[in-house]
Amino acid sequence: MEAILSVLQIGVSALLIALILMHSGKDAGLSGAFGVGSGAGPLGGGSNTERNLTRWTVFFCIVFVVNTIILIRI
């Protein structure tokens, strides 16, 4: 069980890093390559896409925290 949760933790960590880097910032960082920060792009649009990206980031942050707590308890 611990091995499965550890592998899940690594996967969620990598996914969180990618999601956080995709958020638009002052300089539009990595998100500019995918059209997230701009008004139009391959992902549809700025505000709706950014909102969904934020929701996914929060969801995976919660999964990360819960998994961390479970791993500490084991």
Image (cartoon, rainbow, N blue to C red):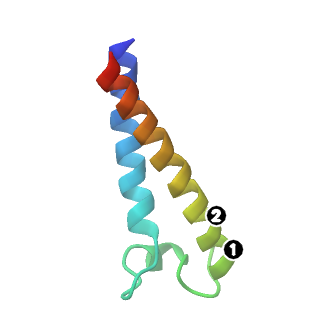
Q: Quadrant of residue 41?
A: bottom right
Question: Cα distance, mark 1 to mark 2?
Answer: 6 Å
What residue is at 45 percent from the left and 35 percent from the top?
A: 66
Q: Is residue 18 visible?
A: yes
64 relative to 20, above or below: above
- Percent position of residue 38, x then y: 56, 86
Front in this rendered view, residue 20 or 69: 69
48 relative to 20, above or below: below
Kindly identify the amino acid type of the residue bearing the numbered disc 1.
Asn
Mark drawn on residue 48:
1
**Left or right: 56, with 4 as reference point:** right
Mark drawn on residue 63:
none
Dividing the image into 4 quarters, which one contains the C terminus? top left
Kindly identify the amino acid type of the residue bearing the numbered disc 2.
Asn
Outermost residue toward the top? Answer: 1
Q: Quadrant of residue 29?
A: bottom left
Mark drawn on residue 52:
2
Front in this rendered view, residue 32 or 59: 59
- Percent position of residue 13, x then y: 35, 44
Of helix, strand and loop, which one carries label 1? helix
What residue is at 63 percent from the left and 70 percent from the top?
A: 51
